[in-house]
Amino acid sequence: MASQALDNPDRLVTSDDPEHPANLIPSLCAKFWTLGWVTGTGGGASIRDEQKELMKPQDIYVLSLAGQEASLKNRTYLRSPPSYKPSQCTPLFLAAFTRRGAGCCIHTHSHWAVLVTLILESSAATADGSHRVFEINNIEQIKGFGRGHGKTGNLGYHDTLRIPVIENTAHEEDLTEFLEEAMDKYPDTYAVLVRRHGVYVWGDNVHKAKTQCESLDYLFQLAVEMKQLGIPWISDVPVTLPKRS
Amino acid sequence: MASQALDNPDRLVTSDDPEHPANLIPSLCAKFWTLGWVTGTGGGASIRDEQKELMKPQDIYVLSLAGQEASLKNRTYLRSPPSYKPSQCTPLFLAAFTRRGAGCCIHTHSHWAVLVTLILESSAATADGSHRVFEINNIEQIKGFGRGHGKTGNLGYHDTLRIPVIENTAHEEDLTEFLEEAMDKYPDTYAVLVRRHGVYVWGDNVHKAKTQCESLDYLFQLAVEMKQLGIPWISDVPVTLPKRS
Amino acid sequence: MASQALDNPDRLVTSDDPEHPANLIPSLCAKFWTLGWVTGTGGGASIRDEQKELMKPQDIYVLSLAGQEASLKNRTYLRSPPSYKPSQCTPLFLAAFTRRGAGCCIHTHSHWAVLVTLILESSAATADGSHRVFEINNIEQIKGFGRGHGKTGNLGYHDTLRIPVIENTAHEEDLTEFLEEAMDKYPDTYAVLVRRHGVYVWGDNVHKAKTQCESLDYLFQLAVEMKQLGIPWISDVPVTLPKRS
Amino acid sequence: MASQALDNPDRLVTSDDPEHPANLIPSLCAKFWTLGWVTGTGGGASIRDEQKELMKPQDIYVLSLAGQEASLKNRTYLRSPPSYKPSQCTPLFLAAFTRRGAGCCIHTHSHWAVLVTLILESSAATADGSHRVFEINNIEQIKGFGRGHGKTGNLGYHDTLRIPVIENTAHEEDLTEFLEEAMDKYPDTYAVLVRRHGVYVWGDNVHKAKTQCESLDYLFQLAVEMKQLGIPWISDVPVTLPKRS
């Protein structure tokens, strides 16, 4: 079938199966658009698309992962849409695929994510570099994240979720080096924030990537609202209600 | 029909009737997803589902309530989906069914609910334990709640709505004991908040549970906005406008 | 056809015309539900409905206006749904129809409307009674309102929009007296706010009522956000930018 | 075909092609309505429409651009809907078409846009006239804007996006002079804010106009939230994270 596809690359983006990427990516992007995650030129899910909610299977690029370990720059496109150019996010998506075995990577410009990076940047913590990491604990939704690639089970309610923040760059593909560095330094993370830009979230498959992306956006929104109400993101000692008698 | 169902359990989740739970639960979850109540891994309506807006009848568990009074732990599954495990919320849903005769129980991670518990926790009232109850009065939407199981009629505009807050636990099924305790202490409540987690809301039937869940989320949102504007949730003496002459 | 309808009242709520009330009311309520205006038990458009977004033509009451001038209490129902009771809002809707010749009246529990009444109530202006009126000027959207029943044209950008606030009552139909009083005192208004409750908005026809209701909710939301940013609702002297040279 | 159209003007608003303006304008307005950009009587996309989400091709005006350079006032309508009057925005849309070669112009009453003008107006910067321009830099979404009509490429992350603010007028068509003046003074801008009113955004084609309009609304929302959190819109010196070692 792969050789058939090379004869007729458009077969790679044609399927009757609703779970096929050719159908899943457009339906995900339509959904993400309504959430404000991929409006305008922002965000994506492996393809360059200016109008995410109008995305069609024909707009999809198909890449080969063969040889990607050796060189991320040397990309083989099995199928390309006629009138677009590849996304600047491509090397970032590939990093999640090759370094973490991710099955799906989502990039959003969610303004909750951007606001979290702005709050970290403006906080007193800047001097000692602690603005590089978003940290939150004792919130139920933290359970939505796996413990890390290759580990079993999810984070617990009392665990601290840590999402590293990397510097933004003038050209999006120049983020790759920083992203890989953050992946090395935080081997268990499934997401990386980009300062004044957005977030990359991945997962072992489409469903896990989507679940983690939704859980993270939920936590970013809560964190901004907690900040506005003067409630800290980390509660060092879990407050326990006295047992009712 | 029940014996037929046991021969072919999938009949339990197949119906042409739009009001059948097999069709109602997926349509409710799709709707709740758009409200942000059950995103990521959060919330549910008796079934474990990672992608609420994509829920299908085939994803539904069917349980027998026979013998539940004696032991909530000893559950009989009449039908189970092939590739999921039962929700940790199951004993909590069952508590509403057996202790209150509820026909439907909804669990959301609405961030308005979580913010209300955070505001109560951080308020000066913590010392004397009053952070265990959310209280609001003199808001029209309070009329959306029944007076209590077995009582007739709804709360009035001047009545105070009280929703107890229970402690969150590392494992969701360990909440059951606290939930039952709160149900005993507040025999008229149709909802229980869980600190830094969300809310459980039930009703005599699906329509009442949904109505009360929507009314409560409306009040939680209003309460957070009142807090941001410095307006208290309780007005001890109803302010009366002088009669116009 | 009216006599046919009396023989078979369900004909009153059956039509192939999308502009017929039998089809328009359910589609409006579905839309208003997504805006958060009629969630739970709140709000409506002349009919009692617990699940606005699920409303069906069969759920609609049909009333006769004959003799309504003489007595609003003496209502003739041409057609009633089998399993509901008439809305407590009915006399309020009728007041708009008979006193103002309105073709449509909408009642919402929009939390922006409720917050505006709470802000007015908590402001220093309470003592002199000025909390009875919401006032805003120099906002373009004010142009969305007619000058008043029987007058031609709409308000201008520099005009002050005034919406009276009436006291809420324990029983919704007891609002009628206050509503009529406010209509008398503010003969040009197309809306009345109800403290800690919501808003009634009407118009000469369905399209004008909907347009004015949307414009008003827009202004209420803007007013709450202006309050949070410390910007007053009334600017006495229009600020004029110096002519660029 | 143009002469055929003049014989039967309704052909100008009839097409099976989803990309034809007859189909594109109604679908855009339906979408913009859900975003709150064109509710009530506010906003539009070249046609007067009170109910943007219900817009039909038959509601569309068709104008000739021939001779527009000479006189914007002397407009030729090739086709007019029977029961509407032309929008007051018409000369403003035409200014974008004739002066900038725009293919599409969008006008919204987005409350984020209005709040940005209110914040600028109330800021200490008023005295020296700097409230006439909204400025923001070092936000990724700025890349969503072209460098200017006739220039190639888009703005960069570190570039400052500048959107001029013009005074609002009692009659919308009187804005034309101010709009043209702002276009002359800011030759590279694709948008103009109108104080206490909204924004006009255009682009070389429908897709670019829509993309720039979404990106701008994203930035306006972010700017209001930054203001609420005390974070400035302009960061003179890009903060650079130290290289991790």
Image (cartoon, coloured by chain):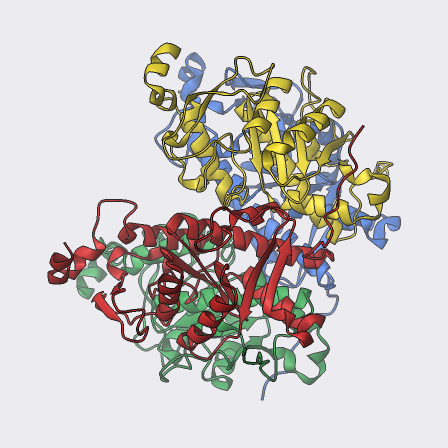
Chain colours: A red, B yellow, C blue, D green
**Quadrant (top left, top right, bottom left, bottom right) of the N terminus of chain A:** bottom left
Q: Nearer the viewer, residue A166 or A81?
A: A166
How many numbered marks have been drawn onto this rendered protein structure?
0
In the rendered image, the residue lying farthest to the right is C127
Give the residue displayed 35% in from the left and 83% down from the top. D152
Left or right for D55, reference A138: left
Residue D121 position in % (x across, y down): 67, 73
Residue B50 position in % (x across, y down): 45, 41
Q: Quadrant of residue B222?
A: top right
Left or right for B46, reference B192: left
Left or right for B240, reference B151: right
* Rendered view: D177 above or below A79: below
Give the residue displayed 23% in from the left and 55% down from the top. D15
Give the residue displayed 50% in from the left and 25% down from the top. C60
Q: Nearer the viewer, residue A222 or B75?
A: B75
Q: Nearer the viewer, residue A18 or D120?
A: A18
Residue A173 visible? The answer is yes
Q: Nearer the viewer, residue C1 or A58?
A: A58
Residue B153 position in % (x across, y down): 69, 19
* Rendered view: B7 above or below B164: above
Q: Quadrant of residue B186?
A: top right
Left or right for D180, reference C147: left
Give the residue displayed 73% in from the left and 69% down from the top. C237
* Rendered view: B213 above or below D89: above
In the rendered image, the residue lying farthest to the bottom is C245
Residue D58 visible? The answer is no
**Quadrant (top left, top right, bottom left, bottom right) of the C terminus of chain A:** top right
Residue A183 position in % (x across, y down): 47, 66
In the rendered image, the residue lying farthest to the front is A151
